[in-house]
Image (cartoon, rainbow, N blue to C red):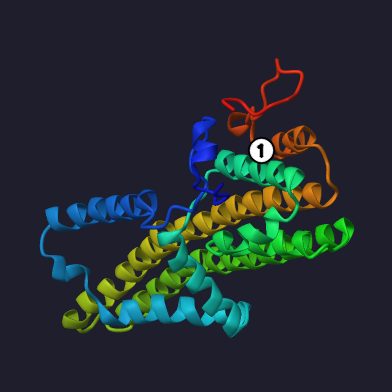
Amino acid sequence: MSLTRDSAEPSRRGGRSARPRGGVDMATLVGLAAAAVVIFVAMASGGSLRAFVDPPSLIIVLGGTLAVTTASFSLSDVAIAWRDAGAVLIHRTSDPRGVARQVLLLAEAARRAPETLRNVLPELKHESFLHRSVTLVAEGLPPDDIERMLIGEVEASGAGKVKSAGVLRRASEVAPAMGLIGTLVGLVQMLGSLNDPSSIGPAMALALLTTFYGAVLGNVALAPLAAKVERTAEEDALVKTLYTIGAVSIARQENPRRLEMLLNAVLPPGKRIQYFDRDSDRGSPRGA
């Protein structure tokens, strides 16, 4: 019997496949694209788009945002944050209910034949955390040690994503501030050259466009990406917590029905499962 997360068993019991679904995150891309289109239409309807292009303003906003953000963190933190921001656009999502059903399927198989865990390891390589969790159980490590190691990994992974979200959040705050600084620079240049009418236009463009660039960069791009990284961290933490609970329960040789209750205690109310038939004295899986 296959024990991969997309096996026929969970589907037969009413669950969706828990295998991470890779690909472009359409919600993020559609949202960002829609905001860009709205802004573009507003810009185009008022005249020439060239009026909204000013290299000095871009340098102030982009360069200033990157510099100040880097000064607030380390170079490695900023690099990891940009990597995580790009990763959310192609985030591999997992269905928590499918994950819970897969954990219960593994627990049932291990309860019937403990050697099954070693046999199924090659099928779990697509999910590194699950593979590592099952490996620890198959190697016979004490349940408390397994729990401590896996919880530590979940916390470390979550802390890294939270830090990345903090970097992006800081950048989203800095960008409008850099726009305001550019505005002040442009106003000073304009006031200093009132006797030269030809220089008033470029100075005013610098004053206004830096505010525009900063507002767009901070509120349309960086803030949504920060929120998306935070949400991704929460989703990943939930999935890894389910795997941790399952691995520890299997290591302790607990009844799968108790494991189901432990998993439902972690799952959101709308995602809870009923894997076993409540009316059955034997507690057999639904649909079995």
In what element is the residue under mark 1?
Answer: loop
Q: Does residue 179 appear anywhere in the picture?
A: yes
The residue sitting at 27% across, 56% down in the picture is 36
- Residue 104's place in the image compared with 142, above or below, is above
Q: How many marks?
A: 1
Residue under label 1, please give it.
267
- Residue 227's place in the image compared with 15, above or below, is below
- Residue 280's place in the image compared with 189, above or below, is above
Q: Does residue 191 appear anywhere in the picture?
A: no
Foreground: 33 or 193?
A: 33
Give x and y (percent) for residue 230: 57, 56
Foreground: 201 or 243?
A: 243
Residue type at the position of mark 1: Leu
The residue sitting at 56% across, 46% down in the picture is 1
Give x and y (percent) for residue 287: 56, 25
Q: Classify 10 Å Cα crowding around label 1: few (below 14), some (14-19), many (20 and above).
A: some
Foreground: 186 or 250?
A: 250
Give x and y (percent) for residue 282: 75, 23
- Residue 278's place in the image compared with 212, above or below, is above
Foreground: 62 or 52?
A: 62
Q: Quadrant of the C terminus?
A: top right
The residue sitting at 71% across, 60% down in the picture is 133
Residue 261, quarter of the rendered image: top right
Left or right of 106? Residue 138 is right
Give x and y (percent) for residue 154: 71, 60
The residue sitting at 27% across, 78% down in the picture is 203
Furthest-top residue in this view: 279
